[in-house]
Image: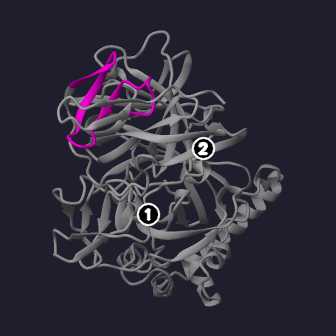
Amino acid sequence: MATPPRAYRAACTFCGAPVEFASAASAVAVCSYCRSTLVRDGDALRRIGESAEVFDDHSPLQLAASGRYLGEAFTLVGRLQYGYADGTWNEWHALFDSGRSGWLSEDNGRYVFAFDAPLSGEVPPAGDLVAGDKRLVAGQIWDVGSVTRTHLIAAQGELPRPPKLQGEFIVADLRSTQGEVGTLDYSGPSEPQWSVGRSVGLSELAMSGLKEDSEKTLTARGVECPSCGAALEVKLSTTQSIVCGQCAAVVDVSQGVGGALQHYAQDQAVREPQIALGTIGQFAFGAKQVQPWQIVGYVERCEVPEDPDDEQVFWREYLLYHRTEGFTFLVDAEDGWSWTKTITGVPSRAGDDAVSYEGQRYRKLYSYTGKITYVLGEFYWRLQRDERTFNTDYQGPAGKRLNREQTGSEVVWSAGESMTADAVRQAFSLPPERAKALARDVSPLADSGLGQIMSGTARFAIGLLVLVVVLLLFARCSRDNCDELRDTFGDASNEYQQCIRSGGGSGGGYRSYGGSYGGFSSGGSHK
């Protein structure tokens, strides 16, 4: 193992308190007493300004916490806390035993471990970057994931270079087909800082020294609903928005408890989802071991039809949380259930209407505009009224799914798989009598691939059979159909109300595979 550089210690030039550098190679430290930002100048310290105080965002990470990454031990020695229009995020300076520096940064409810890298070739100006574009950076093609205007809120501990204490700057997150995330930080006076990393979970880092009181499901932050005054308990450290259980107002807490709490009212009265908030299910997402996942948020979404006279399509998403694995969505759609979570990289193009991801081909199903209709619980991104997203769904082999979701300044990809209603029921330990309410119209050929190998005669016969069934259903369509929707989704559901408005017609439906984030941008690689 390499011998780490010797530690360095000096007195703060402003207050005289001791300031320690775990590595003599570090350039900057923030005094823990007076928050002076101190730059090493030979064997002396020079004060360049004062950092604001870090506000408590209930992150489980803290200075001196340690872990292992790729077999090498590290310690968190510094922190940068950033703010932007939709909230905040942290970047933690990790010092390895070898003396190497890295960055552990927040990433869509998970984390990215990144390392500074040299830039070669032409670097795109910040103003030329647009989400969704492809750009050549450091000799590699990247997809621009997000472009964010941000500012530094505060700094702590030991840092490898001086932070930008005043003013705004651009941070752009880029994603590759190799599962990497690259970050261009334009806070410097000249060439931007470039880093490259990969997604990690805290469980993979074997972390010790985490905050004992930051367990997200145990310790709650108390705030008052700005709409009705009811007490709100914010339980998740990453929560940016919370829904009042009394008046259903959506409250923005992205600027921290104690800041101005913005909110908006929802039109409908509070209604409970089929599977209640707080319910814990046992799932093995992505072939991992079975783990407990808790429902912390609930989203109802709809497709925005091109023709206002067309009936809307609805679907539901449950936000699930695990203390070390982060967040996953459970999607309830017309063709069945599925799970999905964000991915760090991006798929590669595999033809006009297909993409390739992890060696498998996904064909494009359809593109559509999605919008939220109702939310409950807590969310790790800032909810905004009627914010719309442009979504494209892809279907792969054996029930695998991909979704691309775009807003004005961000593109997010997510991946997942379909699952049976009975698997959902058993995972949440729901009684057998709930099976009928959870069942969906799953096409027997949707994910099997048989539709691609059947003869034309067989496909015609099945198509004719489906047509006959549809005509029969229309013939018997009556108030009973609405009763079924009411029994399944409740009196206040979009499906039941639309069925009543249409006089007992088709009653609307679900998007066969909805987007992954409830119609909202969830933040780029470090947000």
Q: Is residue 503 visible in the rendered structure shown here?
A: yes
Mark 1 vs 2, N-terminal side: 2
Q: Is residue 29 magenta?
A: yes
Q: Quadrant of residue 313?
A: bottom left
- Name the residue at 20% across, 40% down: 34
**Residue 81 at x, y percent in the picture:** 32, 42
Q: Badge 2, how many Cα within 10 Å: few under 14, some, many 20+?
A: some
177 displayed left or right of 26: right
**Coordinates of residue 365 in the picture (x, y in percent):** 59, 48
User: Going 55% across and 28% down the picture, which residue do you hit?
Assistant: 4
Callout 2: helix, strand or loop? strand
Residue placed under numbered mark 2 in the picture: 68
Residue situated in front as seen by the camera: 398 or 184:
184
In the image, farthest residue toward the top: 121
Give the magenta part as a residue range.
Answer: 21-47
Residue plotted at (66% across, 32% down): 350
Tell me the residue at 46%/76% (across/down).
278
Would residue 16 be found to the left or right of residue 120 on screen? left
Q: Which mark is residue 212?
A: 1
The x, y position of residue 298, in whole percent, is: 42, 68
Task: Please identify the quadrant where the C terminus is shown.
Answer: top left
